[in-house]
């Protein structure tokens, strides 16, 4: 089980971004008492999804944006 700081350093992002990914349910975590822990397999799953483009555009970049098309009548 990995803590937030370790995961943040591994992914090269801030601890706050790890929290945000967790809130967005892109990176699943487990509560152990009052602590939040991440399974190594879950971090690897997240990395694979980012590489394949399934987790949006990566950490801090939002996701794919919808194009707005104005209809002309």
Image: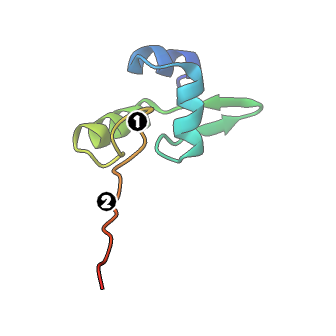
Asked if the residue at tag 2 contacts the one at tag 1, i.e. Cβ–Cβ closer than 8 Å, the answer is no
Residue 61: which disc? 1
Instruction: Tell me what residue is drawn at x 57 percent, y 36 percent.
Output: 20
Residue 71: which disc? none
Camera-side mark, 1 or 2: 2
Percent position of residue 3, x then y:
58, 21
The CA span between labels 1 and 2 is 16 Å
The number of numbered discs placed on residues in the rendered structure image is 2
Which residue is farthest bottom?
Answer: 73
Instruction: Tell me what residue is drawn at x 34 percent, y 63 percent.
Output: 68
Residue 61: image quadrant is top left
Is residue 5 or residue 19 the one in the foreground? 19
Residue 45: image quadrant is top left
Quadrant of the drawing holding the C terminus: bottom left
Percent position of residue 4, x then y:
57, 22
Above or below, 67 relative to 49: below
Q: How is the image coloured?
A: rainbow
Counting other residues with Cα less than 10 Å from the Cα at mark 2, is it few (<14), some (14-19), or many (20 or more)? few
Percent position of residue 18, x then y:
53, 29
Instruction: Tell me what residue is drawn at x 43 percent, y 42 percent.
Output: 62
Is residue 15 or residue 33 the one in the foreground? 15
Precedes in sequence: disc 1 or disc 2: 1
The reply to whether residue 42 is in sight is: yes
The reply to whether residue 3 is in sight is: no
Is residue 32 or residue 53 the one in the foreground? 53
| SS under mark 2 | loop
- In the picture of the structure, the residue carrying the numbered disc 2 is 67
Horizontally, residue 17 falls left or right of residue 56, namely right
| SS under mark 1 | loop
């Amino acid at each position: 089980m990995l803590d937030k700081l370790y995961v943040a350093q591994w992914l090269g992002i801030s601890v706050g971004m790890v929290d945000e990914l967790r809130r967005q349910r892109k990176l699943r975590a487990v509560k152990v008492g009052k602590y939040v822990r991440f399974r190594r397999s879950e971090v690897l799953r997240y990395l694979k999804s980012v590489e394949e483009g399934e987790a949006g555009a990566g950490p801090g970049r939002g996701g794919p944006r919808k194009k707005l098309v104005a209809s002309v009548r």
